[in-house]
Image: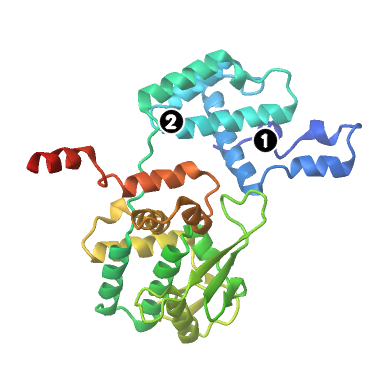
Amino acid sequence: MSQSKEEKKHFYLRHNDALMNSTKLSMKAKQSILLSKAENTVNAYESDWDDFVDWCNYQKASYFPATPETIVNYINDLADYAKANTIARRISAISENYNASGARENPCMSPLVKQALRGIRRLKGTFQQGKTPILLEDIEDILECIDGSDIPKIQKLRDKAILLIGFMGAFRRSEIAALTVENLKFSTQGLEIFVASSKADQEGQGAIVAIPSLQGSPLDAVRALKKWLTASGITSGPVFRGFTKSMSLRKTAISDKSIAEIVKKYISLIGLDPAMYGAHSLRHGFATTAAAYGVEERNIMRQTRHHSVNMVRRYINEANKFVDNPISTIFEKRLK
């Protein structure tokens, strides 16, 4: 449902007339406030706000100003199909927009809304089942499968590089798709990849991901990437690109959706259910594999660039769920 200019005017995180018309703030101060949130965050908040506006229009309810009762009715309708964490994010977006508007009352801060949200969390639970991790053993099976397939050689080289770089660098699919030759720095030790921006990098500072060379190993991501660049003749611009029907190389970067399709394709070829896997399975798989091999969480976080230790500990718990399991301990003692 398209929205009118009047409706869009009430998205204050992007169109903050009250801020811009203030006579007490300098233009420099106004700009710094507008830039306090990353563009990706503002886009996500705007999408959530638009959903709330559409719901209010359908229900013939006021979205600005809105009452706490309207917010509660909205999130309960949302709970019919959305996860608890999605609902919490929508509340956050609506609340942030009201804060940006300068309104005296923020309906999301009402105890009524907080109680409703707490009830929904209890009803639905907050555990989120992500994509199944691709473990190191799975990568080995996939590489063997690629070698034995009738896929064109140039595509084999690209797909091997995508899978190995994606896994070893614990990259998100958008980061893999956005890699450029200018982001790469090869050395005798391996490869440094500069990630200009990412989902977790709200300040836009960028990060460097180091991938060591694994001399003689089929899992050597650095060697796989070099072979792809040499064979493709790519010397600048996007590292990973698609092919035309005649297998000519395109000039534009591969899409992040294509990264997921490549993962699913090879997961299927080794006999696993592609519905359980996606591009995130590479990142998830690296963290889970590292945890299973006893890598310290701070070193896992350095490679994955997680800012919260909670998610990394979730990977560690997942990797160790059969280690020192109480059932195993009980039955080991029974056999003594």
Residue 261 visible somewhere in the drawing = yes
Question: How many residues crowd around disc 1 within 10 Å: few (fewer than 14), some, or many (20 or more)?
Answer: some
Q: Percent x, y for residue 322?
A: 25, 46
Which residue position is annotated with label 2?
84
> Is mark 1 in CB contact (under 8 Å) with mark 2?
no
Please name the residue shown 53% across and 13% down the image. Answer: 112
- Residue 302 vs 253, above or below: the answer is above
Q: Residue furthest front?
A: 336
Amino acid tagged 2: Ala
Residue 76 in the image: state x and y as whole percent.
44, 22
- One can see residue 69 in this view: no
Q: How is the image coloured?
A: rainbow
Q: Which mark is residue 8?
A: 1
Question: Few, some or many C-alpha atoms within 10 Å of disc 2 (few <14, some 14-19, many ≥20)?
Answer: many
Instruction: Name the residue at 41% across, 63% down.
Output: 167
233 versus 315 height, above or below: below
- At 47% across and 55% down in the image, what residue appears? 300
